[in-house]
Image (spheres, rainbow, N blue to C red):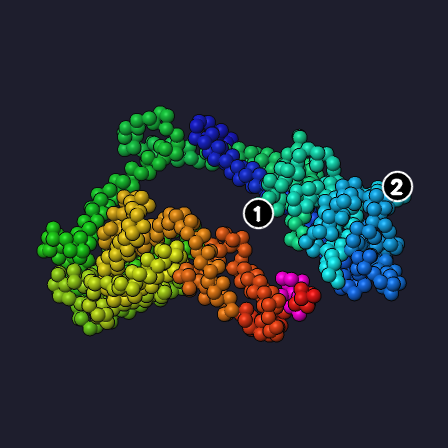
Amino acid sequence: MTRRMPRLNRLFFRILLYFLSLLLPIIIIGAVFYINVSNRLQDEFTQKVQMNLQSSANTIEIYMRTIQETSINFFYEKRPLLLPYDEYNLQERVRIAEIPDTLSKIAGNLSALSVNLFLFADNQKVYTAAGLDDFDYYFDKGYSFQQYNKQFWKQKLLTEKSIEILQVSEVKLNNGVHTSVIPLVFMNTVNGHKAILVTTLSVDMLQRTILNHAVTPSTSFILSDHNGNVILSSDKSMQDSGMLSELNGYFGSGNAKYGEFKLGSTHYIVNYIKSESYGWNYYAITPVSDFKEQINYFVTLIVTICLVLVVVGILFSFIFTFNLYNPIQRIRDILMSKSELAEEPTGRAGTANEFEQIGRGIHQLIEYNHKFKNELELKSTEYLDQSLLNYVQGSTAINEKELHKMLAEQVQFIHPAYMCCYIQFGLKPAFYDDIQDTERLIILDKLKKIVWGLIQPHVNAYILEERECLYTCAINVRDMEDSLQQVKDGLKQLLDTFRYDSQYCYIHIGIGTVHTGMQGLVKSYTDAVHALEAADPQKDFQMIDAQQLPPAVTQYAYSFIDENMIINCLKTRNLESLTNKIDDLLHKNRLNVSHAAVSSLLSAIYYTGCRFLGENGLNAHDLITEQEHAALDKKSDLYLGVEEKKRLLLHFFENVIEYTEDQEQGKSSSLAAMIKHYIEDNYHHDLYLEKIANEMGVSTKYISRAFHEKTGVHLSTYISQFRMTKAKELLLSTNWTISDISQKVGIYSRTTFIRLFKKHEGITPHHYRTLHKK
């Protein structure tokens, strides 16, 4: 028997299209995989260049610090011997040769780093490793700087800078050799006279150091000083093209470490490092084409795999479509052969596909059997739910007798006593993060049945869903004491069932008291709501019995002191403290007052913010919408409305703080002046940030930021500088001991005082006093 080929129509092609659509994930996954691999490789490549550039910068900084420390140590080693040439006596002139010998030793130690070093204390003689040269001859013939003539070096004797790094200059030696160097100038006062020690750092050595760390041969490097002047560039075309100015503008903020630039028709990846000690800028510029060559293999592999999968998928799609369409067509023929279905008006049956015809036939069969039964049960249940919910919430339009009759007939509420429980399910972020949306909908849809199924075996209960995750449980009580225990057993089983899901939800249950008659159902509902309001938000699973709580209080606690603390937080623009204060007030009041009173408390806090704005000449309506004002100006009528109202209140206070902060910028200048005046009057006492902040009446964070913004100096640095200024005055104007002066300026440790003084002045207090008195 031969297999009949199916008659092709739109359904066939639709099924085929569905199967072909399964190939889309292959293309999407391939594209995503390519993008991820490309980005990862580019990040690894960029990080490797960044690490090598950082290594080059660290090596160069070590060179610089070595030269600096060696040069500074020279001054302390030859301090008694070094004088202007005219001031040497005969005995001292004999020892002059020691200075070139020392310079020769230093030059030998720095031979790998430094091209040359020389020393002069006047404009007559220059000390070098080779000996003593005439000043004019040395700078004209012996060691001639292209950018710095002998007049420049004479002026250096007048400089006050102890360390200075000059710009790159070409040097012509007496043998005619030209080389580029970076002069490092070190000045020190020796025997009452200034002495200049100059060490020239080889630019070629710096370039070799950087190139030794290059990742690819095509990587170019640019090194500039803190003023943007080029120190070295391995590719002069990039320097001439103006790319350096573009790089300085892009990386000038200090936030970016690398980026992509286009120079001509070529794209480059630029890495950036800034020297922390000397402010030099290091740029590594690598063509993007180098990186692209590394990922060509992955592109070819991904494209090949995707093409193979797509071809195989198309083949299988045709096979599956033929095998699926044949039985669908046969089922359609069987259903349409039924006389009762064939007589139904088909409307567009001529154009309907097999699925539509099959679905219509099955739907008609089911509808004939269940239509009237389902409609009746649905309407009856919805009417009972809405009537009972409106009744317990205090609606007077509900017919009490009719409701009692429905409860007796439909849910067998035949006993005279009633009680209510109020059950709230709280969903945690993990519920939305870990559970798929389709599964969440199923869980929420079945939650009411789960609650009913756990409570029903213990007591005769009826569950109402006020809104999502908030349920009212109406219970018909036969014997008050026994039934109450049975209710608690059922609720305990509910808590125990969900306790293992504490990472996803929490359950708070309020248990109302038992009352007789239908009106007792309303009273018990009110008690249950009050009990639920007393729930501890820090506990996930808890039952609160209204009988164990004091009667609900309608007056909240909000004192004049609380209001002042709110205003002070607004004045200091401390949103964190303001949030903590509001949370503290809500926590205290929720333990004792009703939900409505807590909502009124939030309105009172909102009025405090409005008065604060009014005192500053502002209007609350400029910072909040009409809808938000209306929500904050009246009590919320839902349990969760308190949290929403709190969110609106904090959003309002954020706007207030942000708006008033702009107006307070001008006040920070006067605050800086007040701080300086306070330090001048109290520098001899123990000063610290918290103490000054308390005196000024502002937070430590604000006072530190405001002082630095207006003066450019950190507060602690300013205090140390002022104390050192006073200490120098006392050293020169009094004969007090170092310990006495330390106490007078507010530094109670003599060791700490000497260390700080030497840090600021470069010498100890004793040497400072001796030197200036001479």
Q: Which of label 2 and label 1 is nearer to you?
A: 2
Which secondary structure, mark 2?
loop
Using the rendered view, name the quadrant where residue 359 is placed: top left
Give the label on residue 176, or none. 2
Hey, what amino acid is under mark 2? Answer: Gly
**Which of the 4 quarters of the picture holds residue 511?**
bottom left
| Res. 385 in view | yes
Q: Is residue 401 left or right of 311 when viewed as pictured? A: left
The residue under the point 34% across, 27% down is: 349
Whichever of labels 2 and 1 marks the residue nearer the N terminus, that label is 2
Where is 213 relative to 533, above or below?
above
Q: Can residue 767 be found in the magenta stretch?
A: yes
Q: Name the residue under label 1.
A: 255
Q: Is label 1 in a helix, a strand or a loop?
A: loop
Magenta span of residues: 756-768
For label 1, count other residues whose C-alpha is less than 10 Å away and answer few (under 14), some (14-19) or many (20+): few
Residue 771 percent location from the top left of the image: 69, 65
